Structures are given as structure tokens and as C-alpha cells.
Image (cartoon, grey):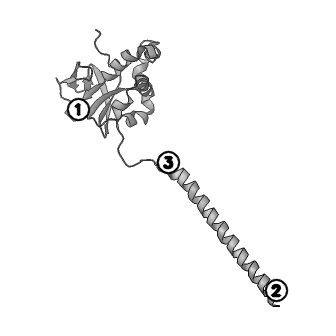
Amino acid sequence: MQRLLTIQLTAVLSLTLLVACGSRDEAANETDASAATHGQAGVTDNVSDPNILQVALQSPDHTTLVAAVQAAELENVLVNAGPLTVFAPTNAAFDKLPPGTVDDLLEPANKEKLAQIITFHAAPGTYAGDGLKNGMKLYQATGHYIDVKVTDEGTFVHGVKILGTVDATNGVVHVVDEVLLPPEG
């Protein structure tokens, strides 16, 4: 009888130990899986305002601009502290260029020319919509100046209409309906 009781007690303790160990392994596996899907790389920042590059990346109307920025390797400029004002042409603005122009500019051999065009769309400092005054001359990152004209029809820079404005953590983005082309030479 004593021996039967010892066997039963051993069996119960063994089962308890196995169940406890099994639970701990499952918990560890759940923790490992959770860490793998929710670790630092899995963090999504939905609270902070976007920087200028993120504004462009989030816009379905600026995929050509993003491709041009990447081809010219200017991403870091749009992520840095700033402040910076960017005049961001829409995809439709790029479509207004002569056929084949965008494809040619995206070629690695034309990287410098593309960078010059993209940089012409940036002005050091923050010029929000109400900060753009009729007759102003904005100094562009290329060293050129562009004229600002304010009329009843809207605000224009370098003869190009501003369609809208988006604030960013490192400046401001003005959406424009044409590509700004720097003076040649």
C-alpha cells in the first residue's frame, strides 16, 4: 500500500512538474515572438509630426519627386534639422515636362543635373504660406533667387502656383503644380 501511494505521489508530482515546465516554455515562446514583432524595429511612430521627406513619402501625389530625390541621393537633406522650405511638384507637374525628360534625369549619368533641379526647389528657412509676401525674393539652396507673387488667384513662386502647404518638423512643404527649373548656365 505504501508503495502504491509513493508511485501515485511520484506520478502526480512528475505531471505537475511537466505541466509547469511546459507552461513556462510556452510563455517564453510567446515572449520571444512578441519581442520579435514588437521590438525597436517594429515601432511605428504615429504621434510625431513628419519631416519633409516623410511628408513626400506619405503622399501618393509625390512619387516622382521621391524617386528624383532618391536618384539624386538627397534624402538626408530633407531629413536634417532644417529649417527648410521645399516647393514640392506633384506627379502631374512632372508629367508636364517634355516626354522622356524625367526618365533622362533619373539616369545615373544625370545625377548632378537632377540634384541641381531638386535643390532649386529648396529654400533655407521656413516660409509658411502667410510668410510669403508679394514681391519677396527667396534665396534658394542653389544660390539663385526666385520671385514671390501674391494675387487674388493665389501665391506663386517663380511663376508656379502653390496648391497647398504642409507643415513638417524641419520646415514646410508647399505643393506646386509645375517643376521649378533653375536658370541655365
Corner quadrant of residue 79: top left
Q: CA distance from mark 1 to mark 3?
A: 33 Å
Q: Within 10 angstroms of label 1, few (less than 14), some, or many (20 or more) residues?
A: some
Corner quadrant of residue 118: top left
**Which of label 2 and label 1 is nearer to you?**
2
* Residue 42: image tag: 3
Q: Nearer the viewer, residue 39 or 54?
A: 39
Q: CA distance from mark 3 to mark 2?
A: 55 Å
Q: Which residue is mark 1?
A: 125
* Residue 4: image tag: 2
Instruction: Please report the residue visible at 37 percent of the width from the left and 16 percent of the height from the top.
Output: 112
Residue 38 image offset from top left, x and y in percent: 51, 52
Q: Amino acid at mark 3?
A: Gly
Q: Is residue 22 left or right of residue 173?
A: right
Q: Amino acid at mark 2?
A: Leu
Instruction: Please report the residue visible at 30 percent of the width from the left and 27 percent of the height from the top.
Output: 162
User: Is label 1 in contact with label 3 (beta carbons under 8 Å)?
Assistant: no
